[in-house]
Amino acid sequence: MSKQKKTNSYQRILKYIKPYKYRFIVSIALAIGLSFLAPLRPLWIQKTIEDYIQKGAIAPYLSKTIWSNELVQAIIWITVLQIGLILMETLLRFIFSFTSAWLGQNIVKDLRLEVYKKIMSYKISQFDKTPVGTLSTRTINDIEAINSIFSEGFVPILADVLSISIVLISMFYVNWQLALISLAPFPVLLFATYFFKESVKKSFQKVRLSVAQLNTFVQEHLSGMSFIQTFNLQEQELEKFKRTNSLHKNANVKAIFAYSVFFPIVEITAAISISFLIYASIYTQVNASILVFYFLSLNQIFRPLRFIADKFNVIQMGMVASERVFAILDNTEILEDDPTIHTHLKEEKIKGKIVFQDVSFFYKPEKQILHNIDFTVEAGEKIALVGPTGNGKSTIVSLLNRMYQHQSGIIEIDNKKIEDYNLTFLRSQIGVILQDVFLFSGSIRQNLTLNNPDISEEQMLSASQLLGLHDTIMKLPNGYDFHVMERGTLLSVGQRQLISFTRMMLYNPQILIMDEATSSIDTESEILIQNALEQLIQNRTSILVAHRLSTIQKADKILFIKNGTIAEQGRHAELVAQKGLYYNLYNSITQE
Ligand code: ATP
Ligand code: MG
């Protein structure tokens, strides 16, 4: 991490405090206040011992009249006040810890929301580059690490350093020779702290890395469970899991080892300090009250010291995490929905004429995918894209609703460039049914209406009946309230497809794109789906990436896509007569 970057990250993180600046100020004020309170008690106890106990002032009065004695009364008062002081300190400490943690949690909440929103606005191409596991680690784990910067980092360290400094000053103020002697073992502690910090840092980096690996591994293997079981890969995959799991354990054990060495070293150093103190007091003949003061002060130094190195680690980890999170926020590859592009969202509807003019496209510059694609679809026409796999059919349709941006040529809808439409509007006019149907976890009703309040129950039911979905839904437990699991695993492929058709019927776009699944389904569903599709494409401009002959034959125009170009185009009968590529494809399908 460069120094410049580091300072930027610090400054940027501090910006998130802004909405909570008063609480932040309170916590800083408390930190300062508490550090001044720290040496107060030892100093006062020292004074009490010196003035009241040590001089033997009260000894003669230790009799029946003790409670009436004013010295004794003074001591009682001092004790009560000391207890009061402790209670006050505890209360302030509570407010301080609570405020710091509260601050951390609120900043995390804000930051997480910002990151989530940002990821939602990413262009689809960004998801081709970044694994889902990485993005979820950023939104969840990394931001949690930033939380600790606030709850355990900045201000708590400031509080510790301040109170240690003030205690040190008071120690030198009372008796600088004794302070020097009792602090003589300190350099050992500094070394120990340094090595501890470095070792823990390394281990924690490994821990984080292996946590991410474990996350990704489990995520991938859970979603691919049926695949793993089908191919009997459990044993082999278990070995991989064991390895990552061990890495995680080893890294953690190393960190624990560092802690187990470091804490006793602090204890021993503290003990040595005290023995130095006692030894010195024999020669310098300091009085007992001073000794008690140094005991208490040393305790107040060592207690926070034990954790301060740890807190620095926490900050460092948080900073590394924040760099990663900020990288997500700084990504400029996002959807630009220009609000200045004027479109009446609800009222206006497009007619649905589509023109591709000399359109070329690549995902990566080194591999051109589409070459000079030219075609026109009049409003209400249905065209079919056919051709061998991996030749660019899905790519063509993904340009139309601007999932990807073509590099050259013009794509127009109703004689207006697609870039000149408001993106939200554009997408509201183009419905896309993808090769694999996406279902949210939720009820079938929610999956059909997408929680759109404008869609009435009657509309939903009539669409569902029209497309032949209704009967299969009524057979499910709870009917339309049947709970669909993630990705719709509880439903058959045909059911899922009918749901996605009905959903589209309700979404009611002017242009329909369908990327048909290659896999064929049983004949009964086939007929059902074919009928549903015919209902769906009525009165809409449709582009169908088709594998099913019945769909292809009925198209107004067929485009045969090969190597990212339109190799042949025309109606079914014309293309068959040409006896070219389409003719061969047609023969191969009909022979099946
Ligand atoms: P199929 O009939 O199998 O669905 P297709 O004709 O729809 O095939 P496309 O999905 O358009 O084929 O793919 C065309 C080419 O683009 C392929 O070589 C593919 O590897 C590549 N490709 C597709 N999606 C991406 C992507 N997101 N990033 C990079 N390359 C891609
Ligand atoms: Mg495809």
Image (cartoon, helix red, strand yellow):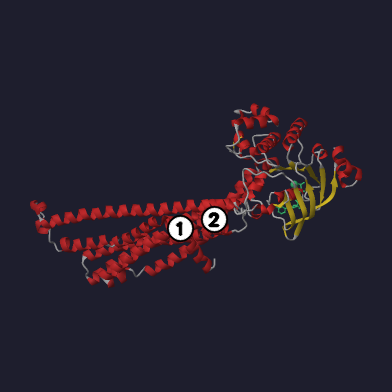
Q: Quadrant of residue 261?
A: bottom left
Taking depth in this image into account, of 46 and 448 the one nearest to the observer is 448
Cα–Cα span, label 2 and label 1? 16 Å
Viewer-side residue, 303 vs 260: 303
Secondary element at image label 2 = helix
Residue farthest left in this picture: 65
User: Which residue position is annotated with label 2?
Assistant: 208
Q: Mark 1 belongs to which amino acid?
A: Ile
- Position of residue 378 in the picture relative to residue 196 (left or right): right
Q: What's the residue at 34%, 52% (across, down)?
A: 94
Nearer the N terminus, badge 2 or badge 1? 1
Q: Quadrant of the C terminus?
A: top right
Q: Mark number for residue 500?
A: none
Choose mark 2 or mark 1, whichever is in front. 1
CB-based contact (under 8 Å), mark 2 and mark 1: no
Rendered location of residue 423, percent (x, y): 64, 50
Residue shown at 18%/64% (left/top)?
50
The x, y position of residue 420, in whole percent, is: 67, 53
Estimate how packed mark 2 is, as few (under 14), some (14 to 19) or many (20 or more) residues with alpha carbons within 10 Å: some
For disc 1, the marked residue is 149
Can see residue 266? no
For the N terminus, the quadrant is bottom right
Q: Residues within 10 Å of mark 1 (few under 14, many from 20)?
A: many
